[in-house]
Image (spheres, rainbow, N blue to C red):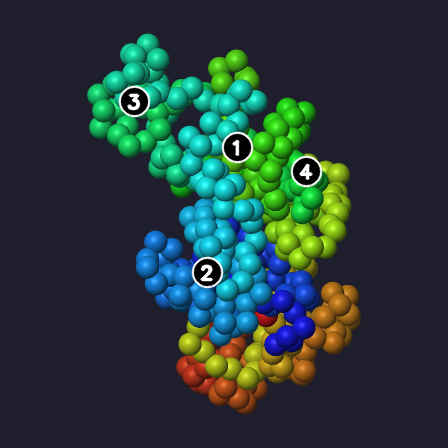
Amino acid sequence: MTRGRLNILIFPCGTEIGLEINRSICNDTHFNVYGASSIEDHGSFVFNNYIGGLPFVFEKNFINEINKVIKENEIDLIFPAHDEVLLKLSEEFEKGCLECPYIGPNYSICNTCRFKSKTYKVLEGSIATPKLFKSIIDVKKEELPVFVKPDNGQGSKGATMVTSLEELKIIGRDKLVMEYLPGREFTIDCFSNKDGILLFCEGRERIRVSNGISVRTASTEDVRFIEIARIINSRLRMRGVWFFQVKEDRHKNLVLLEVAPRVAGTMCLVRCKGVNLPLVALYDSMGINVEILENNYKILVDRSLHSSYKLDLYYEKVYIDLDDSVLLDGRVNLLLISFIYQCINEKIVLSLITKHKDELNETLKQHRLFSLFDEVIQINPEDEKFKYINSNKSIFIDDSFRERKKVKENVGIPVFDTHMIEALIKPFE
């Protein structure tokens, strides 16, 4: 570890927000990234510096335990990755109880944004906010359907459309009951610098949502986004990375749903246009003047579950087949090449073992593979590959079931087909 870098703690690190923050800053040479969580989550597969078992923010010993982590790991900044965590850290920092600063605005802003009712009250009259019913008994039959959601929820989690008064009596208690907005929904990613100036504002349509998270979203231009953003920025005095969500009513007017003073999990979209908002927020929090540089193209992102693996497997050498493994249909297998370079980084010996029928050196040069391997073993098509494997601390990769079976039976080492390579890929250190 190079202590010249700042140590950044992402908490909780296994949320979609935490994972996006990590993707945004993990390769920056000015920071060491740590991840911490209260539960065993995906962060333990992603973060090399992982700290598990922290109390939840509502537990009495939370602040003492997070301060221990800060001291033991010399944490310089905490990057909150959940609304409740941001609210708690901002409160404790304001009281002088937190051992290091956090990335985000002050407690007053965090508290206002955490509750939709408080947000609407501050912004009412400046921008369109949903019609709220004081209680479920105020909803008339002709006003159905209505939308019910938690006051302090995030995204569309815990929200539902209600179409009958009977259903409303069951699920509408202790929740906000508001007008139903039938139109398109948009998230607008924003950034306000240390001087309160709105430097960035760009919208994206929430095309497909799963469990409250936008999993398909596309760049969307609308002059109304910047108008609303400027009003929110001036009324709430935002700082750093934030976003707001709006939805069209039946007349296609934009109505505010929520404002959140944090990173959004799908900010990967603007990051891939050149606007790395978590990274910009880090530099801004350090008092550095920041700029926005964006590529001029539209982008669509679609997300799905991603698998990560931990194998109880040690090896010092890898034997790899060429045809239909490293090369597929005359093209380089990018996933296998990624694994090959992982081995190079870890100083694992790479041995190419092949029955290639053409001029091997020419094929390797053609695909720029010539210098990748520590040794190259070319054998006759009738020969057996297992005869040339001389290390029991090795693994074998080949698309041929017959070749894998022979190696497994005669050498006893683990064997991998090309569809198994993803299990060998580790997080980049």
Rate crowding at label 3 as few (under 14), some (14 to 19) or many (20 or more) other CA atoms within 10 Å: some
Q: Which residue is at the front of the view, 82 or 215? A: 82
Alpha carbon distance from label 3 to label 1 = 24 Å
Point 70% across, 75% down: residue: 372
Alpha carbon distance from label 1 to label 4 = 17 Å
Residue of label 2: 97
Residue of label 1: 245
Dot 3 or dot 1: first in sequence order is 3
Rate crowding at label 2 as few (under 14), some (14 to 19) or many (20 or more) other CA atoms within 10 Å: few
Given contact means CB atoms under 8 Å apart, are the residues at marks 3 and 2 in contact?
Answer: no
Q: Secondary structure at mark 4?
A: strand
Dot 1 or dot 4: first in sequence order is 4
Q: Which residue is at the front of the view, 318 or 116? A: 116
Foreground tag (1 vs 2): 2
Given contact means CB atoms under 8 Å apart, are the residues at marks 1 and 4 in contact?
Answer: no
- Residue 339: x and y in percent read 59, 69
Foreground tag (1 vs 4): 4
Point 36% across, 35% down: residue: 150
Q: Amino acid at mark 4?
A: Leu
Alpha carbon distance from label 2 to label 4 = 30 Å
Rate crowding at label 1 as few (under 14), some (14 to 19) or many (20 or more) other CA atoms within 10 Å: many
Rate crowding at label 4 as few (under 14), some (14 to 19) or many (20 or more) other CA atoms within 10 Å: many
Q: Quadrant of the C terminus?
A: bottom right
Q: Quadrant of the N terminus?
A: bottom right
Residue of label 3: 135
Residue of label 4: 198
Alpha carbon distance from label 3 to label 2 = 38 Å
**Residue 337 placement: quadrant:** bottom right
One can see residue 203 in this view: no
Alpha carbon distance from label 4 to label 3 = 37 Å
**Residue 360 placement: quadrant:** bottom right
